Amino acid sequence: MIPSSYSWKPGDGTILRISKSSLGTFGFCPKQYEFVYIEGIRDDVNDDMVRGTNVHEATGEFYNRVGEQSEAIMQMHDDGYRQRALTALIDCFPAPEEFESFSVGSGAPPLHQLKTTELLT
């Protein structure tokens, strides 16, 4: 896998990393993008930022795990073992102890408890 970077330069062995946040920051103020994503100048960390980072990390880990098992999960689904496929998919969610917090907002359920049945229907 080729590493990515927000401060990508041609020929540096990486690919440009683009997120919705970084693209929005660049559109709002290219200089702010430079300060935040290239120079690494950040605001003080608050609870919302930690929660957001945890959600992004947990979601990324989920998709990595699903990717590793996607063929087996789809085969179970295609063979009519929908409940087994759903269980395998749910098992791809990181356990709460793997991350400090999965809360996606005040009063929201932990990420690992969100419904996944829509993914297989």
Image: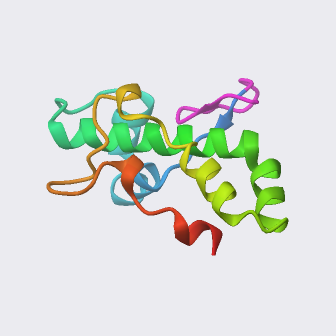
User: Residue drawn at (74%, 39%), measured in percent from left and top?
Assistant: 68
Rendered location of residue 18, percent (x, y)? 55, 48
Q: Nearer the viewer, residue 81 or 51?
A: 81
Q: Which quadrant of the rendered structure holds the N terminus?
A: top right
Task: Quadrant for residue 97, please give it.
Answer: top left
Q: Is 76 left or right of 16, judged from the image as shown?
A: right
Q: Is 11 in the magenta? A: yes
Outermost bottom residue: 121
Q: Which residues are magenta?
A: 1-13
User: Residue drawn at (54%, 71%), measured in percent from left and top?
Assistant: 118
Q: Is 56 in the magenta? A: no
**21 up-or-down from 2: above or below:** below
Q: Nearer the viewer, residue 115 or 61?
A: 115
Q: Which quadrant of the rendered structure holds the C terminus?
A: bottom right
Rendered location of residue 94, percent (x, y)? 48, 36
Task: Quadrant for residue 24, please give it.
Answer: bottom left
Rendered location of residue 113, percent (x, y)? 37, 52
Rendered location of residue 114, percent (x, y)? 39, 58
Q: Main secondary structure of the magenta part?
A: loop
**119 up-or-down from 62: above or below:** below
Q: What colouring method underlies this structural image?
A: rainbow
Count of numbered badges drawn on the protein: 0
**92 up-or-down from 104: above or below:** above
User: Residue drawn at (79%, 57%), measured in percent from left and top?
Assistant: 76
Task: Quadrant for residue 69, please give it.
Answer: top right
Q: Nearer the viewer, residue 108 or 87?
A: 87
Q: Nearer the viewer, residue 56 or 17?
A: 56
